[in-house]
Image (cartoon, rainbow, N blue to C red):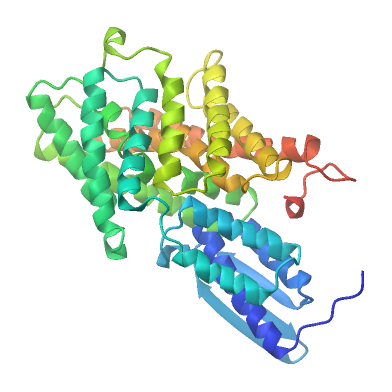
Amino acid sequence: MAEQREPNAAERAVLLRFLAKLGQAELNAGNAVPLVERDLAMIAKANGETHVQVFVLPTVLFLKWENGEEHKVDMAHGAYRVPTLRFDQIEEVLTIARAARKGEIPPSEGLQQLEAMWRTPHYYGNAGFVAGYLLTTMGVAVMLRPSPNGLLVTALMAFVCALMLVAARRRPSLAVMLPVVVSFFLAAAVSLGYRYGLTEPAFTLLIPPLITFLPGMTLTVSVIELAYNSIISGASRMVAGFTRLILLAFGILGGFKVFEHGAWHLSQSMDDRIAPWWPWFGVLMFTFGLHIYQSSKRRSFVFMLITAAMAYVGQTLSGLVIEGASTAFFGAALMTITALVIEFRFKGPPAIVTFLPGFWLLAPGSFGLVSLAGMASGVDTGAQVMTLLFSLSGIATGCLIGAFTYSALLHPRKGASWWRPEDM
């Protein structure tokens, strides 16, 4: 291959702008900081620029170009000051990054594709947004096996929650307080329901409609970044995830305190719950609902379903042998292997798209919310803390072990089989 020429000043300016825009989009897609740095460095090299240094944090990225006495520093804000990406947009961003790493698209074309990605409308509109949220919620509710009355109450709360989300979609200023507001109103509704004969356990009702607020992905990525020794980014993401949990727990406790009834720790008889085979149908409902709600590309649904099912299979089967949060480790490992096989062996969507649903099927979000609510109410605080930390560590370790296993045994490449991040 002929040696690639170094870009001139105008081409370099376009390249740096593309790297900044792409890095910003990847951060908003939830990609881990070390992988964003890898992508930007490889794209610069693919375009003949070897003098670019990249430094990325979850909320900001720096690009430095230096050649002799000439130097230039660019800065771009990160994920938390731009709109949240849907699944179809996440797939588009990572597809652009993959093509740019291979030198298949020039920076100018990449910029055009990124601009088009931001303008892409939701495939199913507001009606699909609400319907998808309802299906997602009901899928989680079915997996928790409530009573038929509990399913009806959950559906009503999910509908109200979806309407609130639609109202807040074009008002980014409401995004920070929305978890508190939504969790407060839902908890208040459940507390009032207890006064009129509702007997369903509170968190069986509250976890499903709040599932997409739970920061399972953020917390798990933070642990993965810490494993990469990205201390600043990992710690900041972890703080952001815990802050979201605290806001949700604060809203829930506030709703119960205002309309206090004292029944939010109710237990449920096994005879009142739906049949044990229903949770498998819940996985299908959840994934299809998330497909519509997050506007993922049509070809992605089957791959999302396979990965979510493998996560649930790993967690369920391991639960036959062991108990507690450690079951999430096996679900995470199996989910990660499946997602990587789909991406690299079957040329499917990027792995982050197919295994995002699996994160909401695993433990960190729901365990974290229950744990923080228990801490705030003084219920077995030490055990709640350990459950939360063990769950997070288990899922993050499962993802790392799954990625290592895939790379060592299944990745389609010649030569060394040891896992190297640049090959992933």
State the image coordinates of residue 311 (x, y, percent, origin top left).
55, 30
Image quadrant occupied by the N terminus: bottom right
* Relative vertical location of residue 79 with respect to residue 204 in this rendering, above or below: below
Outermost residue, left side: 196
Q: Which residue is drawn at 72% across and 44% down?
A: 344
Q: In this view, does 344 lie to the left or right of 270?
A: right
146 or 104: which is nearer to us? Answer: 104
Q: Is residue 60 visible?
A: no
Looking at the image, is 422 positioned above or below residue 342?
Answer: below
Residue 34 placement (x, y as % from top left): 64, 57
Residue 191 image offset from top left, x and y in percent: 14, 32
The residue closer to the viewer here, 247 or 49, is 49
Looking at the image, can residue 322 be seen?
yes
* The residue positioned farthest toward the top in the image shown: 271
Q: In this view, does 276 lie to the left or right of 109?
A: left
Residue at the farthest bottom position: 69
Depicted 363 relative to depicted 200: above or below = below
Q: Is residue 279 above or below residue 253?
A: above
Question: What residue appears at the point 52 percent right and 26 percent down from the top-left corner?
Answer: 312
**Residue 316 or 373: which is nearer the viewer?**
316
Left or right of 127? Residue 411 is: right
Report which quarter residue 300 is drawn in: top right
Count of number-bearing discs: 0
Locate residue 157, reporting x and y percent.
22, 36
Q: In which quarter of the image is residue 360?
A: top left
